[in-house]
Image: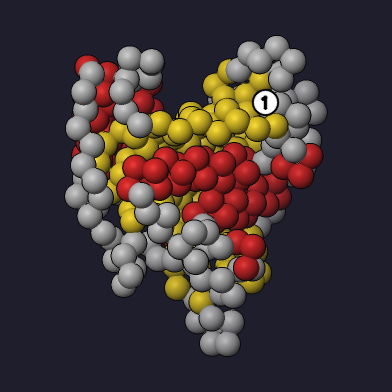
Amino acid sequence: MADPEITLRFLAAPTDAGQSGSVSAGRVLEWIDKAGYAAAARWSGGYTVTAYVGNVRFSRPVEVGDLVEARARVVQTGRSSMHVTVQVSSGPPTTGGLEPATQCLMIFVAVDGEGRSTPVPTLEPRSMEERLLAQWAQRRTELREQVQAAMERQTYSGEGTAPREVLRFLAAPTDVNWGGKVHGGIVMRWIDEAAHVLVTQWTHDPRNVAIFTGGVRFYRPLRIGDLVEVEARLLHTGDHAVHVGVHVRSGDPATGELALTTFCRTVFVVLDEERRAATVPRWEPVSDEDKALDAHAVELVTLRERFGD
C-alpha cells in the first residue's frame, strides 16, 4: 500500500511575488494543487484530476526567499475519489523554523486515458489520527454540499450592476499538466489574478491580498489552446473585506463558444503600511440580482461559521 502522505520542499522565488511584495495567493494555490496531485497520483497509481478545492484560508503571508513546505495527505477515499488535506508552511531557511500559512481540503478523481473515472485503493485508517482525519473529511462533505447548493441557486446575468472585470486570453503550452490539459493550480492562479484586478479597481489600491478562497469546483477540463474568459464580479463588501465571485469559461477560439469550467468565491483585504487590514469603500447593491448576491455572500459566511470553519 502506498504512503498516503507526501511533502514538497522548495524556496519561494522572486518571481512568486505579488503586488504586496509577499508571495501571491495565486502562486500558493498552484503549490497546493501540485502537492495534492502528487499525493493523489501516488495513492491511485495513475493520473488524477482536481475536482474540488475548499476553504483555503491564508493565515499569514509567505515571503520571497522563505523555505516552503507543502504537505499533502490522503485522508479518505471513495470508489474513484480521494480527499486530500494540504498544509503549506514557510519560514526563513536560515532557521528552518516553519509556521503554517494555509491549509485546505481537496478532492481528486482518478481517471484513465479516456477521461473515465477508475477505482482507487481503499484507505483504511490505521491509527487514531487517521480515523479523526477521515471523520473530519466526512463532516466537510455536509458543508460542501450546502455551500454548493447555495452557490448554484444564484443568478449571474446582465441585470446586475456590480463592478466586474473580465480577462481573456489563450491557454498556453506552458500551462499544461501531466495529462495534457491545463493544470488546476494554473486555473486557480487566474482566478486570483482576475479578483486582484477587480479589487484594485474598486479600492484604488494594489496592495490587496486574498485571505480566503473556497468552493472551487472544476466542471470540465480546460485544454491548451482554448480561449479562456475569467470574469470576477463584486458580491459584497464589509468594513475590511471585498467578496468576489469568479467564473472561468473556456472553449474553441474558432467558434468563440465558451462553457463554464470553474467557479468559486474569494475574499480580499487591502493592507495598509503596517500590513493590517484597511477600511474598504462600501458597495451598495442596486438591482434585485445585486441584493440577492450580496445576501448570498453573507449566507456563505454564516454557513462556514456554523460548521466552525
Tell me what residue is drawn at x 76 percent, y 44 percent: 174
| Residue 152 placement: quadrant | top left
Residue at the spot of label 1: 227
Left or right of residue 112: residue 18: left
Tell me what residue is drawn at x 22 percent, y 17 percent: 288
Q: Nearer the viewer, residue 34 or 85?
A: 34
Q: Is residue 122 above or below residue 269?
A: above
Give the percent coordinates (x, y) of residue 239: 19, 50
Q: Is residue 226 above or below residue 127?
A: above
Q: Nearer the viewer, residue 307 or 281?
A: 281
One can see residue 218 in this view: no
| Residue 300 placement: quadrant | top left
Q: How is the image coloured?
A: secondary structure
* Residue at the bottom extreme of this rendering: 94
Q: Amino acid at mark 1?
A: Leu
Give the percent coordinates (x, y) of residue 95: 54, 87
Q: Nearer the viewer, residue 237 or 130?
A: 237
One can see residue 158 in this view: yes
Give the percent coordinates (x, y) of residue 40: 64, 46
